[in-house]
Image (spheres, helix red, strand yellow):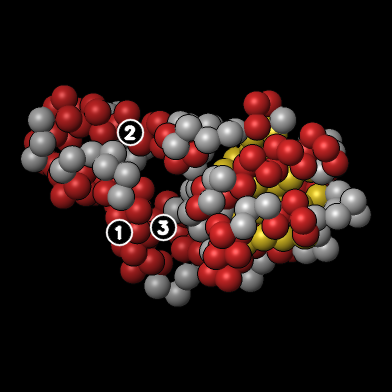
Amino acid sequence: MYVKRQLDLLKILRKKSYFLFGPRQTGKTSLIQHTLNEYRYYNLLQTDVYLKLSREPQRLRQEITDDDKIVIIDEIQKLPILLDEVHNLIEEKGIHFLLTGSSARKLRNKGVNLLGGRARTRRLRPFILKELNGDFQLLKALDTGLIPSIYFSNAPFEDLEAYAGNYLREEIAAEAIVRNVPAFSRFLTVAGLCNGKMINYTNIASDAQVPRSTVQEYFQILRLQNSIFSI
């Protein structure tokens, strides 16, 4: 099921290149497929596309023609070396790029070319009320959240558990953001139960079995991971 989103990609891409960031499964690829399907598209999750461009990044320059006014590269953080080619194509051909990813932090941490102001940044977040219209259910939204794949799932709680596991494995453990992943996992569970309430660091620390100072650090990680630039 596709739900029309408020973000008009075509409208903004007529003016400038953009980075499109947002949490996993918020519908970035689906939005692209439904609104920009006539434009050249590279999905770096596809093994053949990834291997081709990782071996020869210059193929991006070779394949893109003067007729390509808009080009999309999905999951750009998987192959940040392509940003040099993107930079060149913006300068030489005036092409507008849409570059998607779950977070800008991975790019910044690698010290790669972030195009020096040649691309603006937008974020795609979970559903909002105006997008769901008649499909919005308050209790369901409170129980499972508004991430598209989970909101319409026939087993939302199982999917939420898998989503949290992927987050811990790919965003936290893989990047060594915290040293004690089990402690952070316990913290996430307790913090989730406190959603919409006044934060009491001492109580959360007791329930999660970690020091109060660690809880403050963990909340700071969540804030940074969900900031507009996901630094």
Q: Quadrant of the N terminus?
A: bottom right
Q: Position of residue 204 (x, y in %)?
A: 17, 35
- Neighbor class of circle 2 (other Cα within 10 Å; few <14, some 14-19, many 20+) is some
User: Looking at the image, which residue is at 70% across and 57% down?
Assistant: 59
Question: Would you name the residue on which mark 2 appears?
Answer: 221
Q: Seen in the image, is 165 located left or right of residue 92?
A: left
Q: Report the amino acid beneath label 3.
A: Thr
Q: Quadrant of residue 188?
A: top left
Q: Nearer the viewer, residue 37 or 54?
A: 54
Cα distance between the residues tagged 2 and 3: 22 Å
Mark closest to the chain's N terminus, 2 or 1? 1
Q: Secondary structure at mark 3?
A: helix
- The answer to whether one can see residue 146 in this image is no
Q: Quadrant of residue 43?
A: bottom right
Q: Position of residue 164 (x, y in %)?
A: 33, 56
Question: Would you name the residue on which mark 3 appears?
Answer: 144
Label ID, residue 165: 1
Q: Position of residue 221 (x, y in %)?
A: 33, 33
User: Looking at the image, which residue is at 39% across and 31% down?
Assistant: 223
